[in-house]
Amino acid sequence: MTGRRGGLRGAAVPALVATALATALAVPAAASPAAPGAPASEASPAGTPGSEATPAVAAKPYMGWSSWSLESTNFPGYGGSWLTESHVLRQADILASKLKRHGYEYVNVDAGWNVGSETNKSLSDEYGRPVSDPVKFPHGMKYLGDQLHARGLKFGLYLAVGLYIDTYNDGRTPIHDAPGCTTKDIVYPDLRKTSGWDNVSYQLNFASPCTEKYIQSVADQLASWGVDFLKIDGVGPGSNQGDAAHDNVPDIRAWHAALERTGRPIQFILSWSLSHDKADVWKENSNGWRIDTDVECYCDTLVTWNNSVKQRWNDVVPWIDEAGPGHWNNLDSLDVGAGPLDGLNEVERQSHMTLWAIESAPLYIGDDLTHLDPYGLSLLTNDEVIAVDQSGNPARPLSQDTPQQVWYARNADGSYTVALFNLGKGYSDVTADWSELGISGRPAVRDLWSRKNLGTFGDGFTDNLPPHGSRLLRVTPAKVTGEPGVPLGVHATASTAGSVSLAWQPVNTGTATTGYDVYADGAKVATVGGTAATVTGLHAATGYAFTVAAHDARGVTSAPSKAVSLTTPAADGPTAYEAEASGNPRTGNASVSDCSRCSGGKKVGNLGGDASVTINDVTAPKDGTYLMKLDFTDGSSGRTAVVTVNGASFQLPLHGGNDNDWGRPRSVTVPVHLKAGANTIAFGNPSDYVSDIDKITV
């Protein structure tokens, strides 16, 4: 949830790091034995966390139901007044009787439980601890927790970050079990507001010892009610905020410690649109984080495709490697169970759940469970698809250059989870090329949605998919060899006139990998133990084909990776080109603005629609594929540029900071094909906004 208490959500646009394969995926060791990719008998390969202990909480992505989607919609019969004790228990009855056997067990009561029906103010007890509205929940929260536990379910609650403004009470409210402490002592004297909405809570001041005591008092009360799950919302950096007043890192650390001290295993989730810049902090102190804005459309249905299901294909990518046992990427509610209420057609509903499953995202239903239709129930209870989610092995895209995309995860048993998506507006072929996945021979293919074996396929698998359509496959190679798997995702990360840096994913199949050999034009040029290498001693303005092979302790090597072709820049390269330079034409409302942290102190913004910028006279010494580094700024969750090189276009999703900081340069590298001499590279997007462009370096 983001739009609480009348808050408005800004225009949301897609985000991701264009080099989707730039970071290595460490496959979690806690995969379900029955799921695709269950751990094989070999020792864990280099670069994978096979020795990690299974965490006590969130060993797998949680599954259940959440109230917010129904609270957010204008669909008749729902909305802000829908949240009541009786409605929640009715959902719990359906969850227990129809869905628990498939793994759904959490019942999460979202925002509004502690807001008075008559006053519309946050409610608290004599010590400033949140309490439930007696009109909505006449028997209180402990009763609700007991009822859920009696049904074999788990109990989740929601709080906003900081101290609720309505709880402050002119600073006079005492803190439980903290003599001399009041609410005046736990906030800043200037009563600075925090959270993504700026109208809900005051920022907590952890310089005061009273503040941690307050957090502990609330955590202890939640534990006494039998709470199994806590969501803290409006957390920054993130939630479209990033300044000092919205730095809630101290809050999250305090909550993490306080929940642990209760002695009760409480899953701890952060929301919304968390900043990836603080991923290490979130991983250390929580069990998961929302990577994006609300999935809900705040309209007459729960969601729509454009607002905001589709953007998650972009926004999840930079987070993929953060997911693992104990902490998962949260894509928000799963609204696929009741067609007219959902706001999606059947094709889109399947794709919605397919992405959630292949990303090992928590599966928490947002629908009214009393109105599930047969198709929705079939989606939510497909145990083969659920097993993909619970295996804890997130997939990644081969490429996002076009709306026709193939996502994959290589499982430890040698099989692959492969999803085909057509994110475009018309029917289109989508092909999974086995060579790009390191697969040889004729692998067996099973369709997980239809639960049917499709036979064996040579070269690849193609389907003509409808708009927003998908297929979800398990691909099992014809034979398993006594050698490491083929390195995947090999790509260039930097280049100079005499060097090229490469990176790839760790191998998690076959015999245990102990290192990697790097080849240039078939000659071995480096041997490394990790998943990155810099090849030096190259010639300027020269094309090379790079491959990588894995080897095990016996010296047995894998087949080589797919070749990466790259031309080194000229002897005096690479060369930087400023977007705002006078010779670069702009169209529409594109404009130059000041940017103190940008190169040259300027950038080009207001891009998208009919607004674009073209960088002229980008010089290459010969025809070839070169590495382009793009510097840009983006304080949103991210935006997608359409890059046009000499008339040929491709999509380039750019990952933002989720922190409203439009002055911080970020960068991404991407290969571009240039001709000898002068080239033009344009940035725009006829159907969406674009990040601000600082410069390119080629």
Image (cartoon, rainbow, N blue to C red):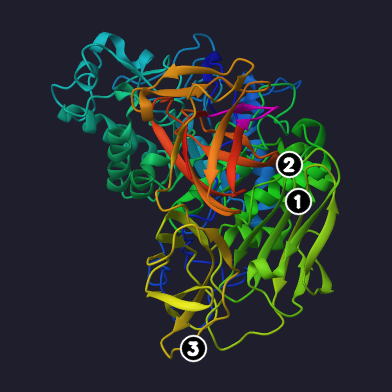
Pick whichever, 85 or 458, lies toward us.
Answer: 458
Say which element carries label 2: loop
Local crowd size for mark 2, using a 10 Å CA cut-off: few (<14), some (14–19), many (≥20)? many
Residue at screen point 42% across, 75% down = 525
How far apart, in angstroms, are the residues tagged by discs 1 and 2?
8 Å
Name which residue type carries label 3. Val
How far apart, in angstroms, are the residues tagged by discs 3 and 1?
43 Å
Name which residue type carries label 1. Leu
Residue 315 image offset from top left, x and y in percent: 56, 40
Tell me which segment is drawn in magenta.
Answer: 683-691
What numbered label is drawn on residue 336?
2
In screen coordinates, is 49 left or right of 168?
Answer: right
Residue 387 image offset from top left, x and y in percent: 64, 62
Which residue is label 3 attached to? 556
**Magenta segment: does it hold 565?**
no
In screen coordinates, is 113 left or right of 447?
Answer: left
Q: Earlier in the sequence, mark 2 or mark 3?
A: 2
Q: Residue 390 is drawn in which quadrant?
A: bottom right
How far apart, in angstroms, are the residues tagged by discs 2 and 3?
47 Å
Name which residue type carries label 2. Val
* Circles 1 and 2 in contact, beta carbons < 8 Å: yes
